[in-house]
Amino acid sequence: MREISATDDEWKRTNFASYDYPAASVSIVLVVLVTWVLLVPRYGLLGAARAFLTSILTWCTAFALVLAPALRSQRAHAVTMGGRRTAMSLSLSLYNTAAVMLPSRGAYSLRCHWLRWSGLRVGTNVRINAGTRFYDKYVTIGDSVWIGPECSLISGAKGQISIGSGVDIAPGCIIVSGSHLIGDCRRRAGAGSGAPIEIGDGCWVGARATVLAGAKIGSGCVVAAGAVVKEGYYPDDCLIAGVPATVKRQLQKQNGAPIGDDSLC
């Protein structure tokens, strides 16, 4: 997994330069409108109306992104980066608004492209379902990842979230990399803090699990439903469960081929 840098301007320039914004904007609007027409016979006028609203929001996002190429001159580089950050922030806000309006399943390519335009790093064959929201752009998602409905990923410059390849995240999970220092009696949630979260390749995070700032989950782990994974390192190929979560036992690396020493888990 590639670590995210809050000041990685080179990646931002490369990411934005790789898109033809006007063409992409028109394409997305046409795709959404055609989808709306196709959904009328199956879902009726209400479903069509929801898709139409989604198309409007998509168009607004695309319009904001079209402004970025106009600011590409070297002389206006500082303005360019500020404009791009504003466009990405607006795009992500619109994505979260539209997240519940897109079809509950499907539209995966649209979601992924939208998130990439919003500054997130999203791999190939990623499937993100309805209602999943992203708060800030400091998220890396590997290839062949499944994220179920109604998940929340809350990141920050001090708390990047890295999700490996082949990861499955069940519905209702919360991954939050921010926290607070304990304050005095006037306000116990003191100064804000954050720490990176890493979820290794091939992990399965069960429904309604919570992963907190500073958690580093090794490859091939299973996080039980409802677990609260706090700060700390969790080795590869383990079952993690409980509140707070602890390592319960070691899992097999392959069918019939246990690995390591059970005492490690």
Image (cartoon, rainbow, N blue to C red):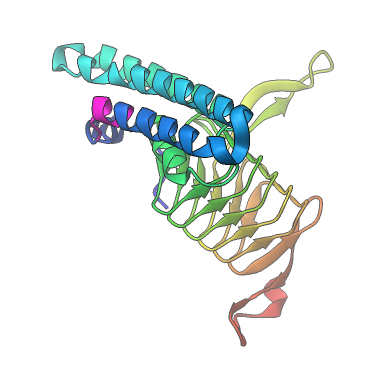
Q: Position of residue 84 (x, y in %)?
A: 33, 20
Q: Is 191 in front, or is 63?
A: 63
| Residue found 64% across the figure and 41% down from its top | 151
- Please, which residue is most extreme toward the left here? 74
Numbered disc total = 0
Q: Residue furthest right?
A: 185
Is 22 contained in the magenta span? yes
**Image point 38% across, 35% down: which residue?**
31
Q: Position of residue 38 (x, y in %)?
A: 48, 39
Identified at 66% across, 74% down, the residue is 251
Q: Is residue 132 magenta?
A: no
Which residue shows up at 66% across the image and 63% down it? Answer: 222
- Side (left or right) of 226 relative to 21: right
The x and y percentages for residue 176 are 63, 37
Q: Is residue 137 visible?
A: yes
Magenta stretch?
19-25
Q: Is residue 89 visible?
A: no
> Of 207 and 36, which appears nearest the observer?
36
In the displayed structure, would residue 198 be above or below residue 218? above
Which residue is nearer to you in this view: 101 or 36?
Answer: 36
Main SS of residues in magenta:
helix
Q: Which image quadrant is residue 159 in?
A: top right
Q: Compared to 10, does 224 lie above or below?
A: below
Q: Is residue 220 left or right of residue 108?
A: right
Picture quarter with the C terminus = bottom right
Q: Residue placed farthest to the bottom in the image?
A: 256
Q: Position of residue 74 (x, y in %)?
A: 15, 17
